[in-house]
């Protein structure tokens, strides 16, 4: 897949890549492998090592708790698996392709090598991941509040 200006612009709009320089985004992009993930295929399994993350370019993913409760669905363009890759913790959710998904796959060891070579990129990625977690927590709090108000 070619790093077209359109694709790079889409990646730059993702929260994880916010405020990264174009050359930093290109370096991450160059380390990715494009994948087509079939409907129903598990991309990340709760309890397994966080050895890769995905940039979902097209398609829909479902995020479920370890017990199998669907927590959310997301459509491309989005990221998944990034917080586990950056924290090194095991997966806390299962991510499955709802329909055919086109994604960029980035292995943890490759990303860590890039971050080791570029400290400013590392700082921005960690900050952006923290902001992603914050946004997800706020959305979860809203959903809980709405659910509890109906009881």
Image (cartoon, rainbow, N blue to C red):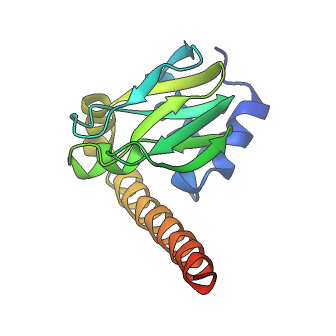
> Between residues 88 and 37, which one lies in front from this camera angle?
37
Residue 91 against residue 138 in the figure, above or below: above
Pick the quarter of the image with the C terminus: bottom right
Q: Residue 62 appears at what percent x and percent y?
A: 55, 39
Residue 53 against residue 13 in the figure, above or below: above
Q: Residue at x 45, y 48 (%)?
A: 69
Q: Residue 143 appears at what percent x and percent y?
A: 58, 72
Where residue 26 sits, quadrant-wise, is top right
Q: Is residue 50 visible?
A: yes
Residue 80 appears left or right of 116: right
Pick the quarter of the image with the N terminus: top right
Q: Residue at x 26, y 35 (%)?
A: 113
Q: Residue 149 appears at what percent x and percent y?
A: 61, 86
Residue 86 appears left or right of 121: left
Q: Residue 46 appears at what percent x and percent y?
A: 30, 39
Residue 55 appears left or right of 82: right
Residue 146 appears left or right of 6: left
Which residue sits furthest front? Answer: 151
């Amino acid at each position: 897949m070619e790093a077209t200006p359109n694709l790079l612009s889409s990646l730059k709009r993702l929260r994880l890549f916010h405020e990264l320089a174009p050359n930093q985004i290109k370096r991450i992009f160059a380390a990715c492998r494009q994948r087509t993930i079939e409907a129903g295929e598990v991309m990340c399994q709760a309890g397994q090592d966080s050895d890769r993350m995905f940039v979902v370019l097209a398609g829909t993913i479902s995020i479920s708790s370890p017990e199998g409760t669907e927590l959310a669905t997301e459509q491309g363009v989005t990221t998944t698996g990034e917080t586990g890759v950056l924290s090194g913790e095991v997966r806390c959710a299962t991510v499955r392709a709802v329909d055919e998904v086109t994604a960029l796959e980035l292995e943890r060891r490759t990303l860590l090598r890039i971050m080791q070579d570029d400290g400013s990129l590392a700082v921005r990625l960690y900050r952006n991941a923290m902001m992603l977690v914050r946004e997800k927590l706020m959305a979860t709090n809203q959903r809980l509040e709405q659910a509890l108000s109906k009881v």
